Image (cartoon, rainbow, N blue to C red):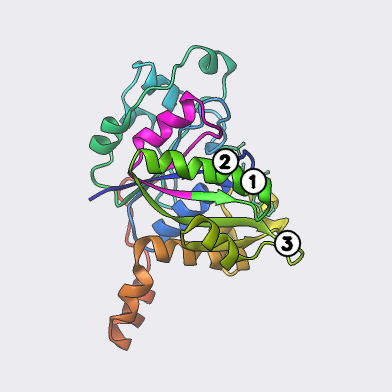
């Protein structure tokens, strides 16, 4: 069954889009069938992380009922299917947030994962994105004001009675006073990953290639792999396999992705 996972936060700019682009690529590398959707209607930029700059159809057209969701899918050679949102100011002005959750479920019924890049705050745009998802990852910086906003987002998701998979701490430095275990106890959720502050992220965005693809051995890529493993349960599956099966699974890597651009 397709898992529709929303990546949310309390404050803006904490790294949701960076996580969606990299987590999507990491899951695809492990052989999963993945789509990523930009539901940040007023602050779209998910496509840019993959070099998608100009595209005729976007999630805005789907919400305005001018196009079907399958028309707004762009296939990346990594195997990730991308549904970008429009960068045009006019589209932002005349597109109300519409719940396209059913269309996502039907169009992506062959996917293992659909990751939704949500907007920030508690307005209709964010609530609409939350409505479309079944489970959530909360991204936060390890600092009190950001955590406090993220806790509010957690309360809203609890009201929807939807599943919270865990937290990702981003832009973490050695100087941060709030540590992982303390933050986990605060949220009463597992910390799925701790991503350090590192200028390589900005570089990978400039190169329009998620860091897990551009530099798979980088410490951030390894941490994102860990997050992907805890989402998919792959690590637990690997541990239950014999040594030979583990080697096979590691070597086989990602199967061919249907219809991907060369
Ligand atoms: N681990 C990191 N180290 C350094 N810079 C980072 C890291 N993660 C993200 N950034 C930078 O932080 C900025 C914001 O990241 P991103 O766009 O992913 O956040 P966001 O939560 O999606 O923002 P918004 O709420 O506006 O949608 C980006 O410019 C990115 O380069
Ligand atoms: Mg974003």
SS at circle 1: helix
SS at circle 2: loop
| Along the line of sight, the residue nearer the viewer: 88 or 188 | 188
Dot 2: within a 10 Å radius of its alpha carbon, few (fewer than 14), some, or many (20 or more) residues?
Answer: many
| Along the line of sight, the residue nearer the viewer: 154 or 93 | 154
Q: Residues in magenta?
A: 116-137
- Residue 249 visible? The answer is yes
Q: Which residue is mark 1?
A: 146
Residue at 35 percent across and 26 percent down: it is: 99
Proximity of marks 2 and 3: CB atoms separated by less than 8 Å: no
Residue 53, quarter of picture: top right
SS at circle 3: loop
Residue at 32 percent across and 87 percent down: it is: 243
Proximity of marks 2 and 1: CB atoms separated by less than 8 Å: yes
Distance CA(mark 2)–CA(mark 3):
19 Å
Q: Which residue is mark 2?
A: 10
- Residue 213 visible? The answer is no
Residue 145 falls left or right of residue 221:
right
Residue 124 falls left or right of residue 70:
right
Q: Which residue is mark 3?
A: 176
Q: Earlier in the sequence, mark 2 or mark 3?
A: 2
Distance CA(mark 1)–CA(mark 3):
13 Å
């Amino acid at each position: 069954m397709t898992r529709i996972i929303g990546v949310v936060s309390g404050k803006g700019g904490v790294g949701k889009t960076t996580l969606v682009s990299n987590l999507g690529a990491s899951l695809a590398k492990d052989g999963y069938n993945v789509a990523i959707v930009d539901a940040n209607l007023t602050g779209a930029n998910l496509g840019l992380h993959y070099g998608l700059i100009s595209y005729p159809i976007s999630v805005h057209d789907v919400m305005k009922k001018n196009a079907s969701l399958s028309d707004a899918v762009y296939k990346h050679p990594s195997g990730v299917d991308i549904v970008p949102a429009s960068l045009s100011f006019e589209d932002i002005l005349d597109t109300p947030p519409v719940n396209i959750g059913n269309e996502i479920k039907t169009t992506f019924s062959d996917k293992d994962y659909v990751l939704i890049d949500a907007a920030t705050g508690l307005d209709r745009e964010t609530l609409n994105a939350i409505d479309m998802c079944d489970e959530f990852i909360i991204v936060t910086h390890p600092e009190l004001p950001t955590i406090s906003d993220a806790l509010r987002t957690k309360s809203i998701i609890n009201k929807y009675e939807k599943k919270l998979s865990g937290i990702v701490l981003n832009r973490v430095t050695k100087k941060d006073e709030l540590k992982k275990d303390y933050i986990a106890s605060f949220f009463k959720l597992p910390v799925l990953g701790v991503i350090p502050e590192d200028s390589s992220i900005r570089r990978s965005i400039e190169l329009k290639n998620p860091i897990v693809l551009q530099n798979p051995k980088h410490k951030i890529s390894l941490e994102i792999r860990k997050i992907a493993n805890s989402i998919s349960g792959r690590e637990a599956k690997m541990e239950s396999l014999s040594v030979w099966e583990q080697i096979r699974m590691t070597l086989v890597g990602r199967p061919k992705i249907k219809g991907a651009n060369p």
